[in-house]
Image: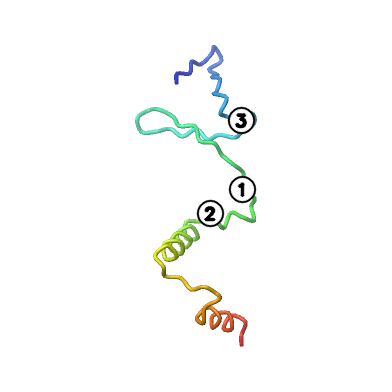
C-alpha cells in the first residue's frame, strides 16, 4: 500500500485504523516506519508488563504445557493450599 502525504505532510490511514486509536510510529533501521496500534494500560496494572513478571508468566505457561504442574485437587495441591493457609 502506498500513502502519499498531502501539502501539510498528512496521510490518510486505511479503514482498519479506528478513529481516535492511538498509534506509535516506530522508525526501523532501513529508514521505513512501522505504525503500531497502542492501548492505554491503567497505572495500577503496569506491574503485569514488567519484564520479570512477563518472564515468570512465560516460565509458568511453559511448565504447564510440559506437564510440570500441580492441580489444586491433587494431594500435592491440597498440601500446598494447607501450607498457604497456615494449617
Contact check, label 2 and label 1, Cβ < 8 Å: yes
Left/right placement of residue 43 relative to residue 64 reads: right
Question: Which residue carries the number 3 mark?
Answer: 18
Between the C-alphas of marks 2 and 1, the distance is: 9 Å
Crowd tier of the residue under label 1, counting other residues whose Cα lies within 10 Å: few below 14, some 14–19, many 20 or above: few
Asked whether 34 or 58 is in front, the reply is 58
Asked whether 37 or 72 is in front, the reply is 72
Q: Nearer the viewer, mark 1 or mark 3?
A: 3
Between the C-alphas of marks 3 and 2, the distance is: 24 Å
Between the C-alphas of marks 1 and 3, the distance is: 18 Å
User: For the residue labelled by badge 2, is the local secondary structure a helix, a strand or a loop?
Assistant: helix
Left/right placement of residue 68 relative to residue 25 reads: left
Which mark sits nearer the N-terminus, 1 or 3? 3
Question: Which residue carries the number 2 mark?
Answer: 49
Tell me which residue sits at (51%, 82%) in the image. Answer: 75
Residue 79: quadrant of the picture: bottom right
Tell me which residue sits at (50%, 35%) in the image. Answer: 36
In this rendering, the answer to whether 9 lies above or below 76 is above
Crowd tier of the residue under label 2, counting other residues whose Cα lies within 10 Å: few below 14, some 14–19, many 20 or above: few
In this rendering, the answer to whether 57 lies above or below 17 is below
Question: Which residue carries the number 1 mark?
Answer: 41
Contact check, label 1 and label 3, Cβ < 8 Å: no
Amino acid at each position: 500500500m502506498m500513502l502519499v502525504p498531502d501539502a501539510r505532510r498528512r496521510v490518510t490511514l486505511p479503514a482498519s485504523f479506528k478513529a481516535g486509536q492511538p498509534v506509535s510510529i516506530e522508525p526501523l533501521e532501513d529508514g521505513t516506519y512501522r505504525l503500531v496500534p497502542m492501548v492505554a494500560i491503567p497505572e495500577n496494572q503496569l506491574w503485569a508488563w514488567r519484564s520479570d513478571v512477563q518472564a515468570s508468566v512465560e516460565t509458568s505457561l511453559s511448565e504447564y504445557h510440559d506437564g510440570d504442574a500441580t492441580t489444586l485437587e491433587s494431594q500435592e495441591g491440597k498440601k500446598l493450599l494447607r501450607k498457604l493457609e497456615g494449617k
